[in-house]
Image: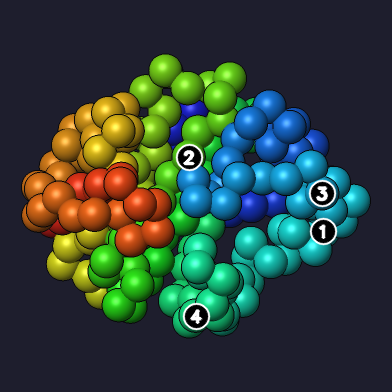
Amino acid sequence: MSPSALVRPDLRYMASFVEALREGYQRDSLRPETPEAIAAIAAEPEAFVRQQLNPPTTIVLPDGSLGERVPETHLWRVEGDAFLGSVGVRHRLNAVLEAWGGHIGYAVRPSAQGRGLATGMLAEALGWCRANLPLDRVMLTVNTKNIASTRVIEKNGGVLLDTIPHPWIEGDFGRRYWIDL
């Protein structure tokens, strides 16, 4: 396997995925992982992988309301059997994702940060979008405090659209970027 390859979630990587969760890896910056959630994933890895490969059609939003979950593909960055990070590619935007979230989200486990993995993961995700989705461009959002992720987006051709108040975190701001495919 190429050292820069993204793969679909697989049971082969679940022990390392759970290890990443325990070290502080977060799939979603708005919803920190809880010990209970980590234990549930560890107890039923097959169910978790199935859910990653076939995500539900609804999602609980950060404000607690139920919303539409747009079609999404999950990709994992691995080396050997070690899980290093993830990318979520949303196939289209809805009103919520246009305001915050965009087409692509990514995260690297803490022990693998600082190695340039996020830049490569985003580049590969853009290639996946070009090959698999009927999109001309993709939107990404980033908290203004997240300088590292801002650099990742800009290194991958991100063009700043605007800076907006964060919709769920009072006093925080985010940047919205477009990347042409």
Question: In the rendering, at what x and y percent does residue 97 appear?
Answer: 33, 68
> Would residue 76 be seen by someone viewing this image from the given angle?
no
Q: Which residue in the protein does label 3 denote?
A: 36
Q: Is residue 91 above or below residue 4?
A: below
Residue type, numbered disc 3: Glu
Q: In front: 181, or 165? A: 165
Horizontal side of residue 71 vs 167, given as left or right: right
Callout 4 secondary element: strand
Q: CA distance from mark 3 to mark 4?
A: 24 Å
Crowding near the residue tagged with mark 3, few <14, some 14–19, many ≥20 C-alpha atoms within 10 Å:
few
Question: In the rendering, at what x and y percent does residue 58 appear?
Answer: 56, 80
Residue type, numbered disc 1: Glu
Q: Which mark is residue 46?
A: 1
Q: Which residue in the protein does label 4 denote?
A: 67
Q: Earlier in the sequence, mark 3 or mark 4?
A: 3
Q: Earlier in the sequence, mark 1 or mark 4?
A: 1
Q: In front: 90, or 10? A: 90
**Residue at point 24% right, 54% down?**
165
Q: Which mark is residue 107?
A: 2
Q: Are marks 4 and 2 in contact (CB under 8 Å)?
A: no
Q: Nearer the viewer, mark 1 or mark 2?
A: 2
**Residue at point 15% right, 45% down?**
158
Q: Nearer the viewer, mark 4 or mark 2?
A: 4
Horizontal side of residue 154 vs 97, given as left or right: left
Outermost residue, right side = 43
Q: Earlier in the sequence, mark 3 or mark 2?
A: 3
Crowding near the residue tagged with mark 2, few <14, some 14–19, many ≥20 C-alpha atoms within 10 Å:
many
